[in-house]
């Protein structure tokens, strides 16, 4: 797999506070890398630096061999607060099509791409509804569909399932695995250790602030995963414990 994203010696400070320090991480095409760490360690700040929403104080972020200096065209972000990211006066299908309008695609092409993305997330029948008519989990599926319709090189997800119930969370985790299985490259920030292991090809653990990568752990689980059987596997249990120790201040050698 070829490298898609390179984070090189990234640090960021604001208002006298250092959030990130000397962060180094690489992501290959088609990988799903989970990022975890203690509360306040700079996970979301790192994601904003990658998205071009924040310019890092030090270091650089490179996407497809080009240094990120502004919001890249070939990148999409799914935030935790799905309700604020959807436009209540537009239908579900038109919400999904919003980013495509920016690229000047014809209306018929936008609608076809939006409908295809909604089918992919199981919401084909909800295309004509409005966001406020949907449950929280369905609204987050709309946000994911919008990213899929855009067909980005890299999908960033910032604690996207933190505001939904446990069953919906599991359904959305499986949806993310489905998206990754179709070749999408994903960087997922989460505070949920089990989730980081269940969906990830690798788990990058950040230290307490200022955040830096203290471990980069490969996930040796089968590509096909199941919410019950996968979580019972000895490798899942071992990795969950290892990540948990690291997040809580333990130590382990950094794995390449």
Image (cartoon, grey):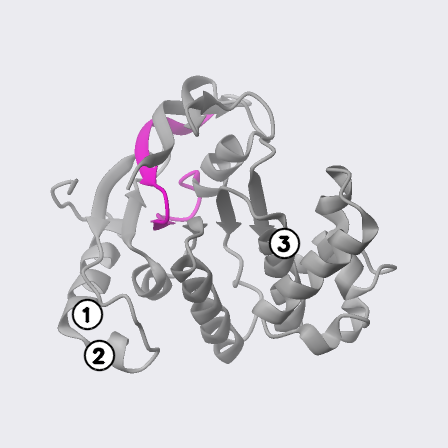
Q: Is residue 179 above or below residue 109?
A: below
Q: Position of residue 211 (x, y in %)?
A: 35, 35
Residue tagged 3: 149
The quarter of the picture where residue 223 lies is bottom left
* Circle 2 residues within 10 Å: few <14, some 14–19, many ≥20: few
* Circle 3 residues within 10 Å: few <14, some 14–19, many ≥20: many
Give 214 or 178, whichever is nearer the viewer.
Answer: 178
Marks 3/2: CA–CA distance = 35 Å
Residue tagged 2: 232
- Circles 1 and 2 in contact, beta carbons < 8 Å: yes
- Magenta stretch? 17-42
Residue tagged 1: 237
Marks 1 and 2, the one that precedes in the sequence? 2
Q: Position of residue 26 (x, y in %)?
A: 31, 35
Q: Is residue 222 above or below residue 186?
A: below
Q: Position of residue 104 (x, y in %)?
A: 78, 38
- The residue at 51%/24% (across/down) is 68
């Amino acid at each position: 797999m070829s490298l898609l994203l390179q984070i090189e010696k990234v640090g960021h400070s604001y208002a006298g506070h250092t959030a990130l320090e000397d962060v180094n991480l690489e992501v290959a095409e088609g990988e799903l890398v989970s990022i975890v760490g203690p509360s306040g360690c700079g996970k979301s700040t790192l994601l904003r630096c990658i998205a071009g929403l924040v310019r890092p104080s030090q270091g650089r972020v490179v996407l497809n061999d080009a240094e990120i200096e502004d919001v890249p065209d070939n990148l999409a972000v799914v935030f935790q607060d799905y309700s604020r990211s959807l436009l209540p006066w537009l239908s579900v299908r038109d919400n999904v099509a919003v980013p495509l309008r920016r690229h000047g695609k014809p209306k018929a092409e936008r609608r076809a791409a939006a409908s295809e993305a909604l089918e992919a997330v199981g919401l084909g029948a909800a295309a004509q509804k409005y966001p406020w008519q949907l449950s929280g989990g369905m609204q987050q599926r709309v946000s994911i569909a919008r990213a899929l319709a855009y067909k980005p090189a890299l999908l960033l997800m910032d604690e996207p399932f933190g505001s939904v119930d446990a069953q919906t969370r599991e359904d959305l985790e499986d949806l993310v695995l489905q998206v990754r299985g179709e070749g999408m490259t994903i960087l997922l920030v989460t505070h949920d250790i089990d989730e980081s292991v269940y969906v990830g090809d690798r788990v990058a653990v950040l230290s307490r602030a200022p955040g830096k990568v203290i471990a980069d752990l490969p996930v040796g689980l089968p590509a096909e995963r199941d919410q019950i059987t996968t979580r019972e596997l000895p490798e899942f249990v071992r990795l969950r414990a290892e990540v948990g120790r690291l997040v809580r201040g333990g130590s382990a050698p950094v794995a390449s």
